Image: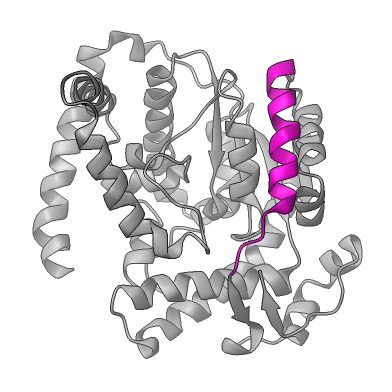
Amino acid sequence: MLLRLLIWTPFVTLFHSLCFMLDYLVFPRLWQQQVNRPVFIIGHARSGTTLMHRLMSADGDKFSYFLYWEMFFPSLLQKKLIRLLGRLDERCLRGRLKARLVRWDDETFGPYRHMHNMSLWNAEEDCFAMQAAFASQQWSLEIPMMDIVDFFHIDEMSKRRGRWLRHYRELVKRQLLLNGGDKIHLSKNPVMSGWVESLIATFPDARFVVMIRDPADCIPSCLKLVETNWRSKGWPKEACQESLDALTEISFEHFSHPWEVLSRHTEVDRLFIDYRLLTATPKKAVVNAYAALGLSMEDSYDCWLQDQSEREKAHHSKFEYSLGEFRISGEEIYARLEDFYIKYEWSAPGAEITE
């Protein structure tokens, strides 16, 4: 990790910076590219943000979004060259290179897909694309230093947020141009629950879908997922504890911060969606989101959504975790988020949970 931070990361960052500069020379349309009325899906991790993003991103004629492999290549020039290599592989090598990538993808992400369905070709959190600028929560997943390296409280970072959000806007512009230039950017990032004020300042016409789930379910689920990720990289349990404590505190803010900011910005289109609605009737949740955000729905997507909705209702992941594994109690969760428990009529927190 030290070698990566001291040698590899600076070299890669320099390469990405050079490609970023070349983008405006090679693709002059980038100067005029606009980001109009983007949609941000936020909320606590494990609250249905991934499912909501996957369902909405299937409306490919309307939305533009980042695929996971595209996170590693933030420059438009890089993405264009890789797509060209993909076409050459298909025509000249009959897809042999992609077949190897698929095998690597299954070997790397397959063991963890019961917790989070990840693949190079899945739509993913576009904050990961900011890793090249060292402004991504990916570093928090690599190293258990969430008590020191903070990518959540962007709204409180007056000096950094302008620079980081300008870079993020540049990433979105490139992705939009890659996908035709006339689509709506669709973002899914739980960490952006702490960026709401900054996003509104950067994208004044932004729209928000905020996923809401019983904290006693999603907080320990998130803690377990992140701890498992750290342990898989060789970090001992004791090295993770301070970061787990920091993440626990941030978890409470995942609920309160978006609510407080959007309450002040009544002009912003938004919808809060209960996780129970999403899992029980996925189509209804998406239809409600389209209506609240002023989006139209084509007949072809409506039909796909109906079929996919039935599949999602029949799907059940296997991910076990316990509230008792972490230094937080159901009583504390209820006391600190009592207003949400009353509003959404959640039951008092339990202990053992299986997803």
Give the prevailing secondary structure in the magenta stretch: helix
Pick the front one: 243 or 67: 67
Q: Is residue 146 visible?
A: no
**Quadrant containing the N terminus in the rendered view:** bottom left
Residue 41 located left or right of residue 122? right
Q: Residue 205 location in percent, x, y?
A: 64, 26
Pick the front one: 233 or 27: 233
Looking at the rendering, the stretch of residues picked out in magenta corresponds to 299-318
Asked which quadrant contains residue 20, the reply is: top left
Pick the front one: 304 or 197: 304
**Does residue 80 show up magenta in the picture?**
no
Asked which quadrant contains residue 290, the reply is: top right
Q: Residue at x 68, y 38 (%)?
A: 308
Q: Is residue 155 visible?
A: yes
Q: Residue 258 location in percent, x, y?
A: 68, 52
Quick check: 103 above or below 240? above
Q: Residue 122 location in percent, x, y?
A: 45, 41
Asked which quadrant contains residue 110, the reply is: bottom left
Q: Residue at x 79, y 80 (%)?
A: 349
Q: Residue at x 63, y 31 (%)?
A: 206
Residue 85 located left or right of residue 273? left
**Quadrant containing the C terminus in the rendered view:** bottom right
Quick check: 99 above or below 87? below
Residue 277 located left or right of residue 197? right
Residue 216 located left or right of residue 324? right
Quick check: 165 above or below 46? above
Q: Residue at x 38, y 52 (%)?
A: 136
